[in-house]
């Protein structure tokens, strides 16, 4: 499991010796170098980015720099809401990232409309990637939070093409255990449902406050 987490972490880090060459500007004009980002778990300012989840682009975020055109990347797709680029340290050939054009540090901080815009492009983009790489499967992955392997705190979705027996994840060889239908499971279900219910009530209340009914 640790090897898997390190692999995910390394997929975001800047490769040693990667440099920008003017000779790439014509045939590879879509490519730009990833730079070290202050928007990383090791930068010591993760909380600062979490406190700035207003959608505004950040100066020291590598993805924000790419969106502004200040840092290079291989762009596969772009629209008004999101951008898809190749990962600079891919876990497999064609490993790509879908990134919103607004800065949000985590998935829970990202508005549903932005998440929907990103996810709506997955079938379209993944189909092209699979055909181009000769793969027939892919992992859709979000590393959300430091413990889950997130190192760039600008929410993003991984599309990782897969082939049979590629042995990409060490966890795939681990034996899965059936769910125990015990008190702990029932308590978990009850707690999650309660939180979801409270969230629905809160959203409904905010809607009524913003849009009072006309009598």
Image: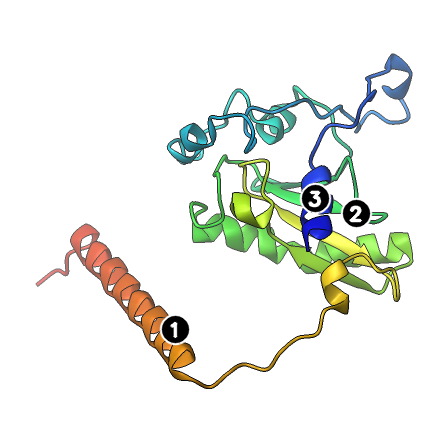
Q: In the rendered view, does 99 fall on the left or right side of 206?
A: right
| Residue wearing tag 2 | 91
Question: Crowding at label 3, few (<14), some or many (≥20) Cα neighbours within 10 Å?
Answer: few
Q: Earlier in the sequence, mark 3 or mark 2?
A: 3
Viewer-closest of 209 and 44 = 44
Is 168 located above or below residue 12 in the figure? below
Viewer-closest of 18 and 99 = 18
Specify the label residue 49 is tagged with.
none
| Residue wearing tag 1 | 188
Q: Residue at x 54, y 25 (%)?
A: 43
Question: Crowding at label 2, few (<14), some or many (≥20) Cα neighbours within 10 Å?
Answer: some
Q: Position of residue 153 (x, y in %)?
A: 53, 36
Q: Quadrant of the C terminus?
A: bottom left
Q: CA distance from mark 3 to mark 2?
A: 11 Å
Q: Earlier in the sequence, mark 3 or mark 1?
A: 3
| Residue wearing tag 3 | 6
Q: CA distance from mark 2 to mark 1?
A: 34 Å
Q: Earlier in the sequence, mark 2 or mark 1?
A: 2
Q: CA distance from mark 3 to mark 1?
A: 30 Å
Assign a secondary structure to mark 1: helix
């Amino acid at each position: 499991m640790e090897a898997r987490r390190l692999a995910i972490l390394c997929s975001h880090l800047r490769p040693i010796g990667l440099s920008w060459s003017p000779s790439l500007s014509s045939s590879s004009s879509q490519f730009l170098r990833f730079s070290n980002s202050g928007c990383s778990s090791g930068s010591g300012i993760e909380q600062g980015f979490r406190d700035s989840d207003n959608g505004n682009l950040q100066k020291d975020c590598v993805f924000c720099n790419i969106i502004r055109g200040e840092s290079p990347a291989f762009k596969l797709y772009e629209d008004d809401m999101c951008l898809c680029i190749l990962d600079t340290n891919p876990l497999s050939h064609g490993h790509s990232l879908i990134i919103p054009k607004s800065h949000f540090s985590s998935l829970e901080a990202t508005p549903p409309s932005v998440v929907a815009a990103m996810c709506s492009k997955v079938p379209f983009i993944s189909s092209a990637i699979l055909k181009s790489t000769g793969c027939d499967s892919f992992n859709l992955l979000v590393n959300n939070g430091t413990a889950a392997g997130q190192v760039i705190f600008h929410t993003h979705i991984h599309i990782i093409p897969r082939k049979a027996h590629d042995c990409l994840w060490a966890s795939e060889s681990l034996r899965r255990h059936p769910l125990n239908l015990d008190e702990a499971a029932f308590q978990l279900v009850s707690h999650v449902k309660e939180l979801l219910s409270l969230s629905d009530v809160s959203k409904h209340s905010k809607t009524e406050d913003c849009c009072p009914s006309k009598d």
